[in-house]
Image: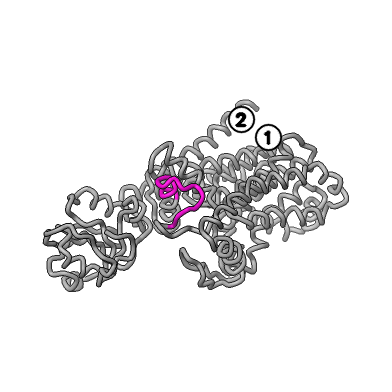
Amino acid sequence: MSKRFNVWLLILAAIMVSRFIGMALFPFADTTEPRYAEIARLMAETGDWITPWFEPGVPFWGKPPLSFWAQAAAIKVFGVSEFSLRFPSWLATLAMVWLIWRLARQLWSVQVAQWSCLVFATMALTYISAGAVMTDAFLALGTTLTLVSFCLVMAGEGGLWRWLFFLGMVIGLLSKGPLAMVLIGIPIVLWLLFSWREASNDLRRLPWIRGTLMTALLVCPWYILAELKTPGFLDYFIVGEHIRRFLDPGWAGDLYGSAHNQPKGMIWVFWLWASFPWGILALLSLALTWFRGKRSGIVSKTISNPGVTFLLVSALAPMLFFTLAGNTLWTYILPSLPFTAILIGRWVSECKSFWLPPMRGGLVALVPVLLTVFVGLAAVGWTPLKTEKELVSYYQLVREADDSPLIYLDDLPFSARFYSNGSAREVTKNGLSNLQTSNVFQHLYVAVPRTWSSDKVADLSPSARKVMEDNRYQLLVIEGLLRDQQPVSDANGVRSNDI
């Protein structure tokens, strides 16, 4: 047993450590990662720990600040880098792995716990989110902590787990907001409907009054301070992000991006992607068992085992909630995966089919190997990415003191904003013409779409010449006549801060 444990631990450690490769080498690609990374960078730079800022002067009301707090703290410790900003999500994923271990061992055995952890760590969405600058890992950590604590308390555990139930709510409310309470409430209510007689007395084990008070004391101050500092936050976040976004697939009120209009029910397809390869394999095996005439056995085992029932409703909760929503993303599946992984982990560890044991090792390695290879190809430039890291780095290398900031014509990508430390600017065509005649800069560095022809570049300015290009943009240098250092007025058409 000790030898098997050590081998399992080494494999799990290799999987988690392999994610470091992507965290350190893979650049931020538009739009999600650099957008959130820039918000965290601004928080660390300004020292404003109450309001996340989308850009200077524009508050970000789309998410609570827990993930930004963690990422800004990582910047303070490790400096600004892709690794430091992704590291908090890796820690959140590692915490979920431990929670899975603890619950699976409590419900069944060490072997089931081992396989559950391996299944979870090697699912596609888990592996990607473990090294990504997103809020979803923190939401999943909060919901997982609360639901695992609930299950353990109902099974007879006490002590700290009674309070961790409420701490998970705090994490969820400060990472995504009221959505966390919905994803926690659905499985608990459904499970109670199936097991009310057995569980009604067990509910008293949780310190409901003191725990709710603790949750309110830890969560409400930030919501109040955020509204006082930037009035309008609560209306946009509570009503807009949680009601209008859910009911209106093409919600046009999004201040920071665009609606993700999907067909209703698409969340179930996202589950197949997120749980790859394990979800597809488990569904195929379940279908074969069902059609072989063992339907009654599957149903009876699920209903008769409260632990299995709780895991099942916890795994299904995100899909049940988002089935009728048209505004969905595949990352919404992440809170489902810890409980999906335990169910699949039990099946993988106990399945006696002749075809599964030889495949298990390959399935464990599939996602880590594929994504590590993809990161390697991207690092050497063989895979095109939507990132401005290379272009910004080139500009920072060649620019001189009298040259302009890096200018993007009409559209400033989030990755350019992050990699330039917020100095890149978005300028209209008229604004660029005014800058050319203002005699402020010796050279204007302007990024325009790569698809522009040489004639279109020449129409922009006769002196424009291309000095480099990436997958989306070409960098132009336009000669200027440096005569004075007068500031550029707003009439020049600059959309961001004054150059």
Find residue 19 and report its horizontal and vertical position in percent: 46, 42
What span is colored magenta in the figure?
40-54
Q: Is residue 307 left or right of residue 127?
A: right
Q: Residue at x 68, y 41 (%)?
A: 164
Q: Left of 159 or right of it: where is 427? A: left
**Does residue 249 lie above or below 374 as drawn?**
below
- Contact flag, marks 2 and 1 (Cβ < 8 Å): yes
Q: Which mark is residue 110?
A: 1
Residue 365 visible in rendering: yes
Can residue 344 be seen in the rendering of this structure? no
Q: Which mark is residue 290?
A: none
* Mark 1, secondary structure of its residue: helix
Say what amino acid the circle numbered 1 marks.
Val
Asked whether 124 falls inside the magenta stretch, the response is no
Q: Which residue is mark 2?
A: 5
Residue 172, horizontal then vertical, whole percent: 62, 50
Q: Which is more toward the observer, 167 or 451? A: 167
Residue 360 appears left or right of 41: right
Q: Amino acid at mark 2?
A: Phe
As for residue 42 lying within the magenta part, the answer is: yes
Q: Quadrant of the C terminus?
A: bottom left
Residue for point 46% across, 44% down: 72
Q: Where is residue 65? Give x, y as percent.
A: 53, 50
Task: Report which quarter residue 245 is drawn in.
Answer: bottom right
Residue furthest to the right in view is: 197
Instruction: Give the vertical position of 273 relative to 104 (above or below).
Output: below
Task: Please name the residue shown 49% across and 36% down the image.
Answer: 14
Q: Mark 1 or mark 2, which is nearer the start of the sequence? A: 2
Q: Is residue 153 left or right of residue 347?
A: right
Q: Residue furthest top?
A: 2
Q: In percent of the image, x 17 and y 58: which residue is there?
A: 441
